[in-house]
Amino acid sequence: MELRNLIERAWENRELLKQKEIQIAIKTIIAELDSGQQRVAEPMEDGSWKVNDWVKKAVILYFPIQKMETIEVGPFEFHDKMALKSNYAKQGVRVVPHAVARYGAFLASGVVMMPSYVNIGAYVDSGTMVDTWATVGSCAQIGKDVHLSGGVGIGGVLEPVQAAPVIIEDGAFIGSRAIIVEGVRIGKQAVIGAGVTLTASSKIIDVTGSEPVVYRGYVPDRSVVIPGTIPKQFAAGIYQVPCALIIGQRKASTDLKTSLNEALRDNSVAV
């Protein structure tokens, strides 16, 4: 509570960022995010998620108290305010060149990072694969045994501070070049086909029943989702706009990562 009070005070009065006590409080929170002791958002027993907006405020306040510096890694040079994450072997994380994670992002033991990027405040749980050129944005929450396929874009959400981050729950499979932003939540073991784009306003339409059921900002557990379009009336006429279609449910036989491609092919979904 003491740390939270200091963060809230500095949020209301940025002049306090000059005080050593405030700077120590902010840096303590970032260190706890890096080690997984703190989270920007956390799952509750009823299946909902709680956003710890004061922790997100600490992430935002960390930037102005940091100074630009040059970071040299072999022949590579960076110029930034943020250190890179380190001690991967001790943490049990596999990091393939040229994967990059910023200090303040948590990677649990068993995470594999192909050449990819994880930003500050993100939480990536055990057994998850962050595949080639995938990006995990600020404060995104990625569950256990998730597969983020090549080129997947998981958006970051810092402001407004009360906004929920993107959440990918345990066991989900996100297909190549899918984009998930603006606090969208993907339910447990859902399968998102290649090229699906989901924003907070995207229509996610369950077409498996006799009548369509529309979701926004949430994909239910075990859903199989593909890109789609729906007609929309404009002044110049009727045009097709993007949506996402829930076309089935993941079967028990496709629970293993090795058979996820089968789950997609069962529903004629591109991997």
Image (tube, helix red, strand yellow):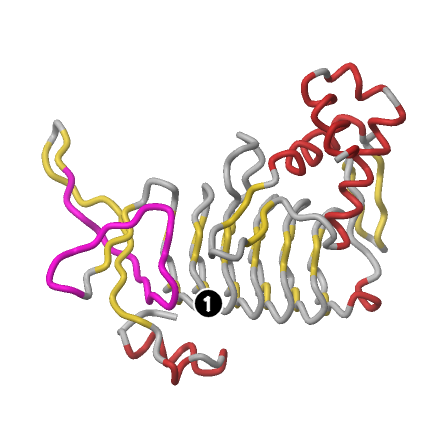
Q: Residue at x 74, y 22 (%)?
A: 10
Image position, residue 147 (x, y; %): 52, 67
Which image quarter holds the N terminus?
Answer: top right
User: Magenta stretch containing residue 52, yes or no?
Assistant: no
The quadrant in which residue 174 appears is bottom left
Front residue (pair 158, 20)? 20
Left or right: 235 as drawn, with respect to 99 = left
Query: Which residue sits furthest bottom?
Result: 253
Q: Position of residue 122 (x, y in %)?
A: 63, 50
**Residue 206, x across and y down, in percent:** 23, 59
* Kind of residue sitting beneath label 1: Phe
Q: Please name the predominant secondary structure of the magenta segment in the image.
A: strand
Place residue 23 in its image quadrant.
Answer: top right
Label 1 crowd bin: few (<14), some (14–19), many (20+), radius 10 Å = many
Q: Which residues are magenta?
A: 209-232
Residue nearer the viewer, 242 or 31:
31
> In the drawing, does residue 87 fall left or right of residue 269?
right
Residue 264, compared with residue 242, is above or below; it is below
Task: Name which residue lies at 84% across and 35% down.
Answer: 69
The residue pinned by badge 1 equals 173
Q: Which quadrant would the C terminus be assigned to in this image?
A: bottom left
Q: Give the farthest residue toward the right.
A: 20
Rendered image quadrant of residue 127: bottom right
Q: Is residue 200 left or right of residue 128?
A: left
Q: Reply above or below: 85 against 189.
A: above
Q: Is residue 215 magenta?
A: yes
State the residue at coordinates (78%, 35%): 81
